[in-house]
Image (cartoon, grey):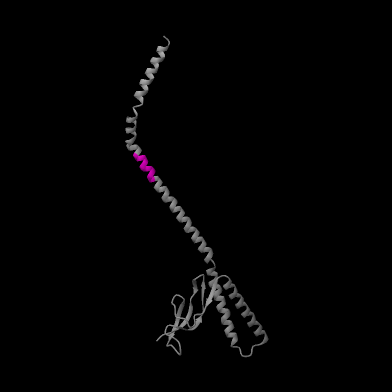
Amino acid sequence: DPQKPKEAAKKKTTKATSEENPPKEEATQECSEESPELQQAKEKAKEMEKKWKMALADQQNYKKIMERDLKNAKEYAIESFAKQMIDVSDNLARGLQNAAKEEQPSPQFTALVDGVKLTHDILHKHLQANGIKEYSPLGEEFDPNLHTALYMRPPQNEEKVNDVVEVVSTGFTFKERVLRSSTVGVAKE
């Protein structure tokens, strides 16, 4: 009978398959019990994921710090130049003060003084346009963050203790930072 060899082969295949593939209960039991190698691999994967997340966070923090530093560098790059221009302004102002003492100025001297005054005014205009502000604290309360006390003297008339009674040199600020504190005289008892 030609059908018998096919049935015999089918029985052998079924028998071999059932020996190779244990019943579902046994397979489920084997899967629920993880091998030490699988546990190690899972732990290593978790550790690598943790390290990756930390590296990513470090990179993002570094990027934020660099962006902030670049912004500050751009924003405050003018500070050094501004300090130098303040010195120029002071020298022009001193020249104007001394020129005012001249009793009989010649027309040439008057023209020179007018040119110096114009230069001084233009310089201050450009400083202000770039956020640099001059301040004179006369009559204000002394603030060591903004003022440098050159001398102290007893209060006179309506002056109060700790008031600025004379401004020797004005101060300058740039975006809330003090470029140069004002040099002042202070009322003290």
Name the image quarter holding residue 11: top left
User: Whole-percent x and y of residue 92?
Assistant: 58, 79
Q: Nearer the viewer, residue 16 or 65?
A: 16
Given residues 44 and 83, the one toward you in this image is 44
Q: Residue at x 58, y 71 (%)?
A: 129
Residue 104 belongs to magenta span: no
- Looking at the image, is 23 positioned above or below residue 107? above
Location of residue 16 with respect to 33 vertically, above or below = above
Q: Nearer the viewer, residue 150 or 163?
A: 163
In the picture, which quadrant includes the C terminus?
bottom left
Q: Residue furthest top?
A: 1
User: Magenta part of the protein: which range?
Assistant: 39-47
The x, y position of residue 59, in whole percent, is 46, 53
Q: Is residue 44 magenta?
A: yes
Q: Main secondary structure of the magenta part?
A: helix
Farthest residue in the right direction? 107
Q: Looking at the rendering, in which quadrant would you find the N terminus?
A: top left
Where residue 52 sits: x, y (%)? 42, 48
- Estimate the x, y position of residue 132 in percent, counting from the top left: 54, 72
Residue at horizontal 33 percent and vertical 36 percent from the top: 32
Question: In the displayed structure, would residue 39 be above or below residue 96?
Answer: above
Apparent side of residue 130 relative to residue 183 in the rendered image (left or right): right
Locate residue 109 relative to residue 174 in the image: left or right: right
Residue 26 sits above or below residue 126 on the image:
above
